[in-house]
Amino acid sequence: MLVAGFVVVVLVVGAGVPLGLAGLVRAAAESAAAAVGVVLVAESDGGDDGDDGGGDDGGGDDEDDGGSEEEQDSGDSGDSGDSGEQEQASDGDDAQFAGRDQAGKASAQEYVSIADVEPNGNIKNGGDFSGGSYSFSCPLSDHHNSDNFIVAPGKRNGAQHTHDYAGNESTNAASSENQDALEQAETTCTNGDRSPIFWPVLRDLEGVGPDVGMDGGSLDGNVGSFVVPASVDYTFHGHGTRRTEPMPLNMQLITGSAKAGSTGEGSNSKFTCSGAADRLTELYPICPQGSQLQRVYDFPSCWNGEDLSSEDFVSHLQYPDETGECEEDLIPVPALRITVSYDQPPGRSFAIDSFPEQQHDPVTDHALLEYLSTESRAQAGADCINEARRCEQGPGEAAAGSGPRGRSDELAVTKNFATAMAEHRNAGAAHGGAHR
């Protein structure tokens, strides 16, 4: 007690002495403190780790109104898939990653027997298709992290929950600053598509996850073992009555809102069970024995014709109306639907990862990708849709992924697609007037 009192007196007196002497005074205080195990904590600016309330997984202002997804964090990248480990957070990280004191479980009212869901055909945005379609295969990557390079670029643990990844195998918080790494990385897609595709993991709450004591894991209220999808289907569909244009390269697509549980905005969550495709719900479905739990992601498909991304994550790419039609001033592009199927854990012992304060609310389900295919594959897909064919893009279209790409498959990284297209044409590449 005497030593502790001496430390306090010395620090108070030291504040009024010249700088040189003040250093000596503090050194003396530190030595005295060390003798009794007192820790002198340096003053900190608290770090501004996100926005205004602890990260976001979509949407400009907290996630937002149209199915966007924003995520928070603080600095370097998390698990990039190399070591499988994330840096453990220190006590100070609770202040950096807000909401941890509000972590909790999903409520029993957020689960429903699929038998109690009335047949509805579809709910929420997207999912009204016409014409042809094209599919491709992208098995899950073996890396996970709690970053979101699209909405929280450069921020470690920007999502405060762990993502499954498919396609591009280099994805982490730093990917936004290193487009070359994305475009040169290995991919799980069998057609050579390098698109990074990601969504929150589903967990078996009775298991033990690999991220206990880590950011994005138990420190952010996400516990349980990862449930590995039994299958994932990626299909681009036609919609409405107008001709579909090829999906622009580098387009960023987001569906759902990771903050919808608190904001009440932007949700596009859709769950069902195999064999009950006409019964979609925003709650966690309890499926009958032998049926698989399914998460359905419908992405927006009406493009403004210029931008590959937007500040609010939704303005550049919007949803068609309930008949699949885009507004006249918007350009129809292929509508992506991803269906993720699981062998369901029993009862209510499962939930998706979320921001801690969202408490695993199923309305927060969301998915993101950046379209890093090639122009030739994008055009071939649009042709399938417009000709009302059903196509599968397999290894036969993988040439661009296994060797040097042709000039027609290259596109400068820019948020203004119209400018990029003009530059591309001037370089001698032929676009055939497909984009207006």
Image (cartoon, rainbow, N blue to C red):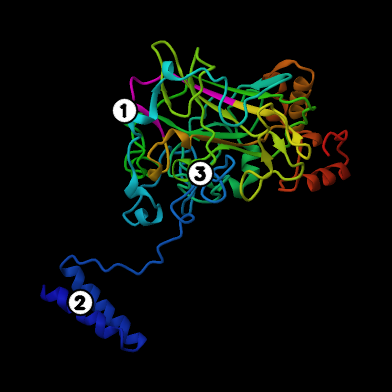
Residues at marks 3 and 2, CA–CA distance in whole angstroms: 45 Å
Residues at marks 1 and 3, CA–CA distance in whole angstroms: 25 Å
Is residue 340 a member of the stretch shown in magenta? yes
Q: Is residue 301 visible?
A: yes
Q: Looking at the image, do the residues carrying marks 3 and 2 touch, with CB atoms under 8 Å apart?
A: no
Amino acid type, callout 1: Gly
Could you say which quadrant of the image residue 313 lies in? Answer: top right
Could you say which quadrant of the image residue 167 lies in? Answer: top right
Q: Give how far across and how far down residue 158 sits, in percent.
A: 48, 47
Q: Quadrant of the N terminus?
A: bottom left
Mark 1 = which residue?
207
Mark nearest the camera among 1 and 3 is: 3
Q: Give how far across and how far down residue 156 sits, in percent.
A: 47, 49
**Sequence-wise, which precedes: disc 1 or disc 3?**
3
Q: Nearer the viewer, residue 419 or 376?
A: 419
Amino acid type, callout 3: Asp
In the structure shown, which secondary structural element does the residue marked by tag 3 occupy?
loop
- At a point 17% along the width and 79% down the height, the residue shown is 6
Q: Give how far across and how far down residue 272 sits, in percent.
A: 48, 21
Residue extent of the magenta highlight: 338-352
Q: Residue furthest top?
A: 290
Mark 2 = which residue?
7
Assess disc 3: are there few (<14), some (14-19) or many (≥20) residues with their C-alpha within 10 Å of its C-alpha: many
